[in-house]
Image (cartoon, rainbow, N blue to C red):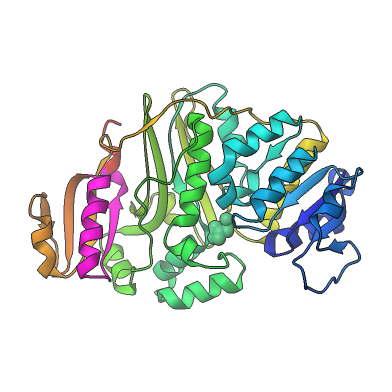
Amino acid sequence: MNIAILGFGTVGSGVYEIIEHAATAETKALHVTHILIRKGKEKKLSIMCDDIKTILDDPQLDVVVETMGGIEPARTYIIEALQAKKHVVTANKAVIAKYLKEFTNIASENGVHFYYEASTGGGIPCIQGLEKALRVDVIDKIYGIFNGTSNYILDHMHRYQSTFDEVLKDAQHLGYAEADPSADIDGFDICNKIRISASIAYNYPITDQFPVFGIRNITKEDVQYFSSKGLVVRLIAETRRKGNSYSCVVEPMLFNENQIEANIQNNYNLISLHGDTIGELKFYGQGAGKLATANAVIQDIIDIMQKKTHRQCTFDHTMNYDSSFCKTDYILRCNPSLLPLLKELSYDIVSSSYFHIKQIEVTKMHAIMNEILKQDATAFMASIYETKEEQSC
Ligand code: HSE
């Protein structure tokens, strides 16, 4: 199987390394014949080039692996590759979240495959797990830790009492963080991953019109305060379905210290889904990092080589966004002078700057938080997982 890799960053070089050091009969059957690098960059290997046309015109080429990241030129190259009747495998969650339906249609029109397991949960085969679960069940909930960098930060702040900035630097050195780590800490990377998962689960292209709140404002003192209450914070994406309505949210969530989510360490992810007959399924593994993510890319290439087809989504179902069936409790930290903004809510004052807000609709809490942030840019909030579970969603 002849492969071209577009982009030679963390994931692209990981794919090349695994194929070069092939350890199995399957990986020995893979050959990297082209690597696309940016114009002006040094061509360190003879197979490197800077012209996409040379690659797409090669009749011997079977698969294009896109690991450039971002929207353009990734979108154009993916479309051109599919139209040139090359299979495409990508790890690029930003472009997939936006153009999943378009890529799927073009692949189908051209009789080739478009696979993207590495885009969600790094090395964890959670897309395949979801697709398999959908053969039997309607999936009414997907939630979990979808980002290695934010988990690494929160885990180290909790276990080693580190500060946010110290741990972010470590995560960057370890190759977990995005080029612009704000995507990791402000929740936008997770937003893309839950959009991809929910789009597959509901067979409907999910937009980014839902509340997202990240961990930029969390302090060492917040983590210590949560610990003193037996709680551990994780940055969570969650989608729920009720009939043809769905909710989506990305926010810090507090778990009891003995829950599984509270004990996920380093760059590991834990993605859970719920179906009527299967109940809860959990997928655990490295959600970020060079070789783990490259492994998922290679699994997709081997599926293509072995003619294993993935679920065919048409993304033509109709769904409505509605979070009114999702209520939960929140712990909010903000300047106490802002308490009037909470006047219509039910809440307890638990210390001079922490407030426990009871059973509020998720979208409403995020709207109030946006008002609070205008006057206290350092404010932080986290929902409480167990109180969400009590709702009959
Ligand atoms: N920056 C991402 C993360 C990489 O930390 O999870 C994998 O998508």
Residue 201 drawn at (x, y percent): 50, 32
> In the image, is residue 101 part of the stretch drawn in magenta?
no
> In the image, is residue 372 part of the stretch drawn in magenta?
yes
- Reply above or below: 393 against 117: above
**Residue situated in front as seen by the camera: 289 or 322:** 322
Q: Seen in the image, is 114 located left or right of residue 203?
A: right
Q: Quadrant of ligand 1?
A: bottom right
Instruction: Name which residue lies at 73% across and 60% down.
Output: 7
- Reply above or below: 235 against 113: below
Quadrant location of residue 155? bottom left
> Residues in magenta?
361-387
Q: Quadrant of the C terminus?
A: top left
- Reply above or below: 88 against 336: above
Q: Quadrant of the N terminus?
A: top right
Q: How many marks?
A: 0
Residue 184 drawn at (x, y percent): 48, 62
Instruction: Name which residue lies at 60% across and 49% down.
Output: 119
Q: Seen in the image, is 256 located left or right of residue 309?
A: left
**Residue situated in front as seen by the camera: 359 or 364:** 364
What is the chief secondary structure element of the magenta stretch? helix
Residue 32 visible = yes
Q: Seen in the image, is 387 located left or right of residue 243?
A: left
Instruction: Name which residue lies at 28% across and 42% down.
Output: 388
Residue 273 drawn at (x, y percent): 47, 36
Residue 67 drawn at (x, y percent): 69, 56
Residue 145 visible = no
Quadrant location of residue 141? top left
**Residue situated in front as seen by the camera: 140 or 386:** 140
